[in-house]
Amino acid sequence: MQEQDFYRTDPVARWLIDKCQLTPVSLGMLSIVITSGLYLIAATATKTLILHEKHLGLLQDWFACLLPFFS
């Protein structure tokens, strides 16, 4: 298997890795940062960062905080 086989079919990943000189690991780290940022923006806009009733907010739910690392 060649080094670039895993992203050959994804034009966005190929462009980011080839043109912007990103490594696959840094591309994954960038994905985690972007996903976490979008989660925080969405939770802030909907006022669900921290909830005080029986429901959990984004910052109170450990699964939601770890989800960007595994998606």
Image (cartoon, grey):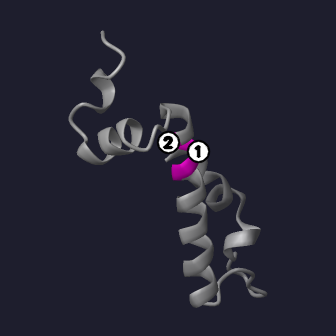
The amino acid on which the numbered mark 1 sits, given as a three-letter code, is Met
Question: Residue 52's image quarter?
Answer: bottom right
Left or right, residue 51 beside residue 43: right
The quarter in which the N terminus is drawn is top left
Q: Secondary structure at mark 2?
A: helix
Q: Position of residue 12 (x, y in %)?
A: 30, 48
Query: Mark 1 sits on what residue?
Result: 29
Which residue is at the far top? 1
Left or right, residue 15 beside residue 34: left
The amino acid on which the numbered mark 2 sits, given as a three-letter code, is Leu
Query: Mark 2 sits on what residue?
Result: 27
| Contact, mark 1 vs mark 2 (Cβ under 8 Å) | yes
- Magenta highlight: main SS: helix
Q: Is 37 rendered above or below residue 53?
A: above
Question: Residue 26's image quarter?
Answer: top right
Give the residue drawn at x 73%, y 85%: 51
